[in-house]
């Protein structure tokens, strides 16, 4: 008889393409993924995945069973959520996922507030996950800078993050300030790797740096921040982080950079679980308390 747990390993490799990526997603070792996949294929007597130049791809047999396995996954998740919805314990584990930026500056203060009041709740802070973590049971709560679009999720906006354009003093001494209205010709820029999270901000950057040379794309604001700090180019950075950096200068802009909303999400079937409810409220309270820091008002940032 097939083991659902083995099928879960098959789906992880099918979705993430490599054993290493699947192992990170499942939070197991790469050896475990390989062993479970080998066991499943031996039981079924057919190869489901095959090596390709960029990882693993589905065979015809794998293609044929994938939709059935995904339906099994959906049913298993439904069972888990139904049970979780009746879990009234005030203590226990709550998994929260978010980007490094939000985890450090929004979630961490929320967690400190939480543990001052509810020491029986254990938080597991996860990195920003590529798939929908609330739907795929990887987390109970997610925080991001773009709105969730799955119908089974309950979401709310808990604040905004303001952005500015920055360069190091050393960089500006060498290149001067950019002519943003002309597309910043002759300048170097550091840009976000994934434009899906910050659509409006990326559109602003694309317009104002259309004639510049992008020298680095990075998914981490810390990477962007430190690249700019050592004179590696200009970048659109969160103001609450960059304004405090003495080596950086915020550049006046002809049009404002749009702020980004902070979205807090939970699956509809988990939102009434007491420990999840407590964590949601503490995160929202921490964001409200830091509102003036995360989204400072500074009208002189826009060039008249």
Image (cartoon, grey):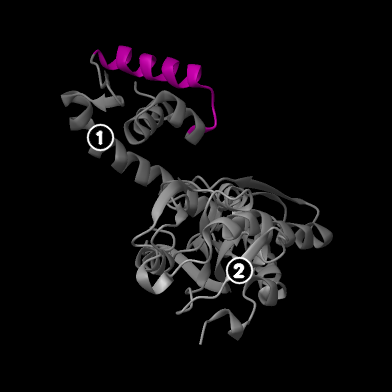
Horizontal side of 209 relative to 287 (left or right) equals left
Q: CA distance from mark 2 to mark 1?
A: 50 Å
At x 39%, y 30%, the residue is: 4
* The N terminus - image quarter: top left
Residue 202 locus on image (x, y percent): 40, 63
Kindly give the residue lying farthest to the right in the view shown: 116
Judge by depth and name the residue closer to the eye, 61 or 96: 96
Image coordinates of residue 38 in percent, x first then y, are: 37, 14
| Mark number, residue 66 | 1
Task: Evaluate whether residue 97 shows in this view.
Answer: no
Q: Is residue 68 above or below residue 139?
A: above
Looking at the image, residue 152 sits to the left or right of residue 300; the answer is: left
| Looking at the image, residue 6 lies above or below residue 132 | above
Is 165 situated left or right of 93 in this image? Answer: left
Q: Residue at x 52, y 58 (%)?
A: 175
- Find disc 2 in the rendering and name its residue: 250
To which quarter of the image does residue 76 belong?
top left
Q: Secondary structure at mark 2?
A: strand
- The local secondary structure at tag 1 comes to helix
Range of magenta residues: 26-45
């Amino acid at each position: 008889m097939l083991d659902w747990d083995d099928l879960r390993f098959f789906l992880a490799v099918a979705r993430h393409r490599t054993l290493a990526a699947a192992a990170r997603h499942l939070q197991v070792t790469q050896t475990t993924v390989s062993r479970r996949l080998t066991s499943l294929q031996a039981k079924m007597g057919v190869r489901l995945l095959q090596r390709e130049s960029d990882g693993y791809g589905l065979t015809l047999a794998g293609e044929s069973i994938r939709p059935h396995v995904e339906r099994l996954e959906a049913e298993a998740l439904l069972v888990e959520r139904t049970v979780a919805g009746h879990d009234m314990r005030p203590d226990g584990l709550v998994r929260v996922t978010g980007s490094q930026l939000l985890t450090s500056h929004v979630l961490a203060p929320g967690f400190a507030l939480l543990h001052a009041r509810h020491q029986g709740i254990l938080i597991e802070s996860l990195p920003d996950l590529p798939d929908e973590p609330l739907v795929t049971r990887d987390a109970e709560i997610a925080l991001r800078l773009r709105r969730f679009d799955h119908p089974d999720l309950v979401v709310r906006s808990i604040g905004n993050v303001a952005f500015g354009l920055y360069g190091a003093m050393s960089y500006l001494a060498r290149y001067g300030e950019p002519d943003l209205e002309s597309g910043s010709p002759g300048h170097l820029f550091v840009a976000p790797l994934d434009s899906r999270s910050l659509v409006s901000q990326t559109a602003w950057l694309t317009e104002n740096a259309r004639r510049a040379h992008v020298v680095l794309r990075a998914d981490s604001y810390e990477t962007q921040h430190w690249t700019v700090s050592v004179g590696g180019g200009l970048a659109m950075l969160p103001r609450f982080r960059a304004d405090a950096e003495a080596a950086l200068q915020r550049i006046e802009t002809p049009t404002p950079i749009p702020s980004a909303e902070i979205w807090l999400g939970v699956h509809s079937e988990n939102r009434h679980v007491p420990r999840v409810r407590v964590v949601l409220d503490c995160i929202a309270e921490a964001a409200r308390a830091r509102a003036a820091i995360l989204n400072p008002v500074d009208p002189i940032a826009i060039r008249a």
